[in-house]
Image: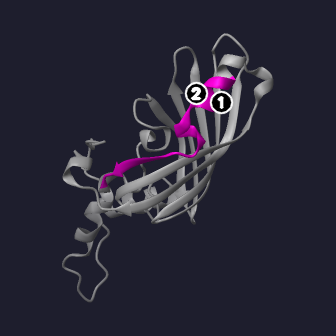
Amino acid sequence: MRLIPNTLPLAALAPFALAGCGDSEPEMPYETELVENRVQTGELAEQPLRPGLWSLSETIGEVDQATMSGAQEAEIEADGDRRGNARTICLPVEYADRPPAEFWAGSGNACQYDEFRMADDALTARLTCNATPGSITLALDGSYSETGFDLAITTMRTGTGSENITVNGRLEGEWRRECTAEEAG
């Protein structure tokens, strides 16, 4: 998956703030202030994920079956991707501090962040995805490092005309290697 950024990440401008340093303390450029503010608010990760090819594996734990029809239960059980099979995705460098929503939800899902925070080795994200019918809400909470993460994930589907469906599980990710041009493009 190749994502095209709307703007140059401010973190990429931070090294230029140090150019020309002398004995006196340099004036803090506007871009550096923005980067520091984004780090303090959690909008920019203190430690981003390593750009490159990631392997993600989601396993199903608890399913709220009381509100599910037999067909819905069979659909979840038959979905191999949600039972631990790995999928791979290329994370571009410009998204290392805030991966696109599709990184977590999978491609082909129209998702957006409601909340996102990566700080102190902890990751919290809330996403809303369009589904026909209804919508899907993902809640991700757990720990991360530059090369891996282990997150509890709760998926809730609403607006289907029947009761809400809630599925709890785990999403684990591991950095594999740099992306090839084909994988990145």
Q: Quadrant of the N terminus?
A: top left
Residue sitting nearer the eye, 137 or 62: 62
Q: Which residue is mark 1?
A: 156
Q: Which residue is mark 2?
A: 136
The image shows residue 180, relative to residue 71, as above or below, that is below
State the separation of the CA atoms marked 2 and 1.
Answer: 6 Å
Residue sitting nearer the eye, 176 or 133: 176
Of the numbered discs 2 and 1, the one sitting upstream in the chain is 2
Residue 80 colored in magenta in the image: yes
Q: Could you tell whether 3 is left or right of 149 in the image? A: left
Q: Residue 87: image x %, image y %?
A: 44, 45
Rendered image quadrant of residue 154: top right
> Is disc 2 placed on a helix, strand or loop?
strand
Q: Residue 176: image x %, image y %?
A: 39, 61
Q: Residues within 10 Å of mark 2 (few under 14, many from 20)?
A: many
Taking the image as drawn, is residue 106 in sight? yes
Residue that appears at 31% across and 56% down: 93
Residue 26 colored in magenta in the image: no
